[in-house]
Image: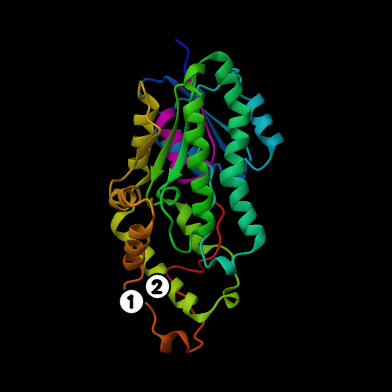
Amino acid sequence: MARTVVLITGCSSGIGLHLAVRLASDPSQSFKVYATMRDLKTQGQLWEAARAQGCPQDSLEMLQLDVRDSKSVADAQACVTEGRVDILVCNAGQGLLGPLEALGEDAVGSVLDVNVAGTVRMLQAFLPEMKRRGSGRVLVTGSMGGLMGLPFNDVYCASKFALEGLCESLAVLLPPFGVHSVSLIECGPVHTPFMQKVLGGPGGMLDRTDTRTRLLFHQYLQHNKEIFREAAQRPEEVVEVFLTALRAAKPALRYFTTERFLPLQQMRLDNPSGSSYVAAMHRNVFPKEPSETEAGTGTSGVGDPELGDPLAAPQ
């Protein structure tokens, strides 16, 4: 029986790595996994995990693939010896955190290029063959930040909101072609190097923004740290949700890895004007806003040795 061919982007760490190893080591031995990453120099962690899980040698193959480069996508596609991809997992992503006016133009462009245009490049490359063959499915790593606005995540949320529209539109179109689904796996906070890189990347220019905004940013970082401490999931938990979507006979458009944030999402639906959500999220993140005295002190420091420099982020 032919194995199911799976291609996954963003496999150097985190969700992509764990999903690739989980499928390649599945006891049924029914998957051939192409694990892709932008830089093959970072493949060591994936091979180490594969050996630890006893992956059969022919079940896992590494490919270089940079979703920002159409030629790189085409070269990786040409390396799939089976001539088809049954399941495409668009997982590569980039984060960006900080006051909007402090974000550099290159960083903003990079996030949109990876998260939005990069996903489009992958779909443009692999969907036509699925449509011709009348078979296939697509899984996209989504985020609760694609379903609700989060302060200081403006550009990241914009990119993930865009993926919601992209995938929902395709989900309406594809059933007549036999492509089973486009499914978004909506993740909350996850213990992966992704957030470490977001919070530990190269610095931005906080002097571009006012003191009150810097104080609110510091307050947000403390809130974010508490959310991760209380609610962050292990990658293995998230992978199980991917498997649920992957195996479903009639996959849904959205799968949620956690129910913790669904009441806020429901609030957005119950009050389409957005007023209830905005007020509730503001109270939740900023329970104590800086006073005029604090905002007028000229204090510019928002550093936290545990958080590192908070601005910017490739995964």
Q: Position of residue 164 (x, y in %)?
A: 47, 41
Residue 219, numbered label: 2
- Which quadrant would residue 258 be assigned to in this image? top left
Seen in the picture, residue 279 relative to 39 is either above or below; the reply is below
Q: Position of residue 306 (x, y in %)?
A: 42, 69
Left of 255 or right of it: where is 45?
A: right
Front residue (pair 56, 65): 65
In the picture, the quarter occupied by the N terminus is top left
Seen in the picture, residue 34 relative to 157 is either above or below; the reply is above
Residues rendered magenta in the picture: 4-23
Residue 229, numbered label: none
Q: Farthest residue in the right direction?
A: 71
Can residue 26 be seen here? The reply is no
Front residue (pair 195, 295): 295
Closer mark to the observer between disc 2 and disc 1: 1
Seen in the picture, residue 160 relative to 81 is either above or below; the reply is below
The amino acid type, in three-letter code, at marker 1 is: Lys
- Image point 59% across, 78% down: which residue? 207
What residue does disc 1 label? 288
Question: Please, what secondary structure does the residue beneath circle 2 have?
Answer: helix
Question: Please, what secondary structure does the residue beneath circle 1 have?
Answer: loop
